[in-house]
Image (cartoon, rainbow, N blue to C red):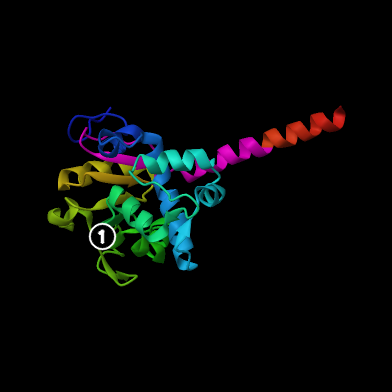
Amino acid sequence: MRRPVGVDRPERSRSAVMAESTRRGVPEATVGRLPGYLRALTSLSEQGCVSVSSDDLADLLGLRSAQVRKDLSSLGSYGVRGVGYDVQRLSEQISAELGLADEHPLVIVGLGNLGRALAAYGQLATRGFRVAALVDKDPALVGQQVHGLPVRALADLDPALAAVAVAVIATPATVAQDVADALVALGVRSILNLAPVVLRVPEQVDVRAVDLASELQVLAFHAHQRDLASVCGDAG
């Protein structure tokens, strides 16, 4: 088995990725819900809402209102009885907790359909991210402009950018580990892996994996269970 760059280990768990916030007293499960809160609050702000109750936030997120109050109290935010939470202030507080006060550059590696779709996704800028570099190994693509940015080879990626960027691996699974090794060698410390493979990276590198096919298979499982229950119910 080929040994990747550095001390290898499986992808870090959700708790490892969220360790910084957890060390500061915010529970791991709460950190995982913060992006949902921020998305709901952004939508409310766009609708002109200046305050929101825990009950309304719970309805928007599919949670219990007691859970909402507990999550937000861990951030030091408490609603006013009869008024609720200040939407703008709470949005700013959650953004700061997530580290979104400053814009994060993204490096997208792999410009197939998925990589191009992500590069064109206009909502990234509103969520604290900026596509800073596009990378592909295809000589026919290198040097071309895609969505206003030049495509470059991975070896040409600026190490100064790599050290502060979040890298997105949108390559086939067969080359994803090689790409991860190269990114780590360039100084990348945060990776979003869209390839259906488990990456092995050094301890100081955070990896989040999104396997769309696996998520679809989970949905297929639940659909199959509903079908079975329906058949059993009809038979009964």
In the rendered image, residue 196 lying in the magenta stretch gets the answer yes
Q: Position of residue 172 (x, y in %)?
A: 39, 47
> Which residue: 31% across, 30% down?
10
As rendered, which of 73 and 1 lies closer to the eye? 73
Q: Quadrant of the C terminus?
A: top right
The stretch in magenta equals 194-223
Q: Position of residue 178 (x, y in %)?
A: 26, 42
Q: Position of residue 196 (x, y in %)?
A: 42, 41
Answer with left or right where residue 164 lies relative to residue 61: left
Q: Position of residue 60 (x, y in %)?
A: 54, 51
Amino acid, disc 1? Glu
The residue pinned by badge 1 equals: 103
As rendered, which of 5 and 204 lies closer to the eye? 204
Q: For residue 217, which quarter of the picture?
A: top right
Q: Evaluate whether residue 148 shows in this view.
A: yes
Q: Residues within 10 Å of mark 1 (few under 14, many from 20)?
A: few
> Which residue: 40% across, 66% down?
122
Secondary structure under badge 1?
A: loop
Q: Is residue 110 above or below residue 199?
A: below
In the rendered image, residue 224 lying in the magenta stretch gets the answer no
